[in-house]
Amino acid sequence: MSKKIVLITAKYSDNLGDGVIADNVRYILSSKIGGSFEVVDLDMSGRRGYSKIGGVSKIKNIALNMPYILRTILVILKWNFVDKRRIKSYLNSEKILDGEVKIVFGGGQVIHDNNLSFPLKLNFIISYAESRGVDVGFIGCGVGRKSSWYGEFLLKRALSRPCVTSVFLRDSSSVEQFNRRFSNSGVLLAQGTYDPAFYSAEAYSINEKSVAGRVGIGIACPNDLQASAGKDFRFDKDILKENFIRLAELLIEFGYDVLFYTNGSYDDEKYLSFVLEGTKYKRIVRPSSPYELVQTIAQFSCVVSHRLHSSIIARSLGLKSVGLTWDKKVESFYDDIAQKDFCVKGDIFSPDDVFNLIKRAINLPIIDITEYKRKIEAQLKSFVGGKQ
């Protein structure tokens, strides 16, 4: 019987950066590591495809504007009556844990208490894996801040199970947080790696050349950012709009070509419409797949965005980027690639400061990501096996 790798990601999220991560891990498993195993995808929410209905964002926006306790209750209800049933049904009906199997949580900020959503999912999936004698590894994942005692309890219970045999996290902040919070609970010590999306250019065979002097301004919904931001951040939709428009003015006055875009989230798209209302600036049509998102970013010489994977995809393509922070993950990414000066606090940033950073970034040498990719590949191979 052939080996099987069950790859668990947020593959079908409308934030297509998550799909990029999933495709990259699958590419590394299938094309770089080798070996006689089948790769089977499992979306963490049990989704079977991308949503074609932007109305899903209405429910999300209602939830984001609820008080914390009501938002958490809504998550628990959705988990028990929708997501859990979908995941369990898929695991049972497809028999994907039959035979010689390993589970890989491939990238994304999954060790994170987002109103209990990920803690509930991790605890269920890892418990289910242990009952079937299946080893579990985390490759290129991120760690979010602690939000609730129960979320922390669920994470510790899940991560301390003996079936969790490898934890490789995508940035130094995640490694530090993980080991500080969980090492006294019988949890395996985490090691550092890099984000799987560094393989984007290779995984998608992107050959498009960027347009010199074209800058992409990536837009993210302030409600979404605020929901996961630290206490020091206050995202105001009107202030952000004013700053983005002023930044575009500065770039165009200097001679740059400017296009606005999103990573695909319907909430981000809605906010982008608000930002551009009454202006003459151009936007790129929403990408409908992870591949289209990478193609979108490939045309720029530099991007500026709150979305972490705009920056990582750009760097994979040999392009430049400026990050707008909203939690530790953006800051930690730039710190780990030795460019911490190229990210700024994302809620009340100065358009002039970001403009100057873009000018500096465009003139910098391309960073060499070869060693980052080798490390990801070697660590993934150490967990799943492969050709020697």
Image (cartoon, rainbow, N blue to C red):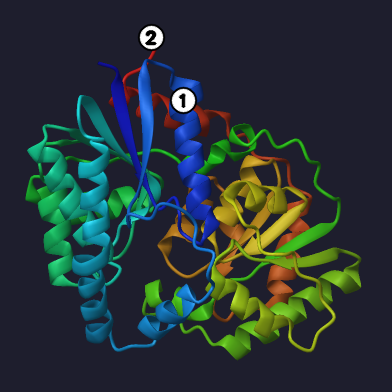
Residue for point 64% across, 37% down: 201
Residue for point 85% across, 56% down: 213
x, y percent for residue 118:
27, 60
Determine which residue is flagged by label 1. Answer: 30
Q: Secondary structure at mark 1?
A: helix
Residue 91 vs residue 12: left or right?
Answer: left
Residue 196 vs residue 250: left or right?
Answer: left
x, y percent for residue 185:
8, 50
The N terminus, quarter of image: top left
Q: CA distance from mark 1 to mark 2?
A: 15 Å
Give, as a three-letter code, the residue at label 1.
Answer: Ser
Q: Nearer the viewer, residue 213 or 118?
A: 118
Determine which residue is flagged by label 2. Answer: 388
Residue 76 vs residue 386: left or right?
Answer: left
x, y percent for residue 92:
20, 43
x, y percent for residue 340:
55, 56
Residue 267 against residue 10 in the figure, above or below: below
Residue 281 against residue 197 in the figure, above or below: below
> What residue occupies the far top of the structure in this picture?
388
Q: Comparing marks 1 and 2, which lies closer to the viewer?
A: 1
Residue 366 against residue 258 in the figure, above or below: above
Q: Quadrant of residue 86?
A: bottom left
Residue 162 vs residue 10: left or right?
Answer: left
Residue for point 57% across, 81% down: 348
Q: Are marks 1 and 2 in contact (CB under 8 Å)?
A: no
Q: Nearer the viewer, residue 218 or 12?
A: 12
Q: Quadrant of residue 284?
A: bottom right
Q: Earlier in the sequence, mark 1 or mark 2?
A: 1
The answer to whether residue 164 shows anywhere in this view is: yes
